[in-house]
Amino acid sequence: MDAIDLRKGFRLSDDDFPYRQKVNISGNKGYFQEWEESGEVDKNGDTITGGLLNWVQDGTSVEMNSSRLSKEQTLEIARSMK
């Protein structure tokens, strides 16, 4: 499943996400973390992929998560959001 959660933005810092990979989302600093179960097969026989992505864009805090989309697909969608 995929989910996108939008909230009133707040500043993100490296201290908020010490174990996440820093990524660029259209000029905004973002943070990505793979699921711990990434690469494993779930109860439906699907391989778990993707992870959790956070960034702030135009005053809005955005969180995306997916266990079906790859990291690259998640970043592509995030960068397409206006």
Image (spheres, grey):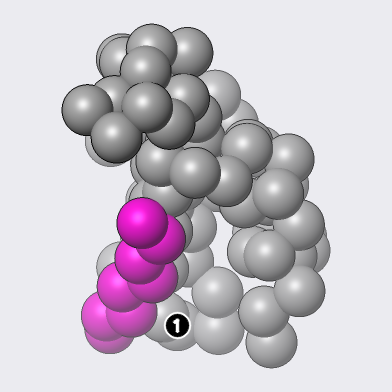
> In the depicted view, which residue is nearer to us: 66 or 61?
66
Q: Is residue 7 magenta?
A: yes
Tag 1 residue: 59
In percent of width and height, residue 72 lies at 73, 40
Secondary structure mostly seen in magenta is: strand
Judge from the rendering whether residue 46 lies leftward or rightward of residue 69; answer left or right. left
Residue 80, image quadrant: bottom right
Residue located 63% across and 36% down the image = 71
| Residue 39 position in % (x across, y down) | 47, 13
- Does 24 appear above or below 33? below
Which residue sits at x=22%, y=28%? 43
Can I make out residue 9 in this image? no
Q: Quadrant of the N terminus?
A: bottom left
Q: Which residues are magenta?
A: 1-8
Residue 18 image point, x, y percent:
34, 20
Viewer-proximal residue among 47 and 63: 47
Q: Amino acid at mark 1?
A: Gly
Residue with the most extreme left position:
43
Q: Is residue 45 visible?
A: yes
Is label 1 in a helix, a strand or a loop? loop
Quadrant showing the C terminus: bottom right
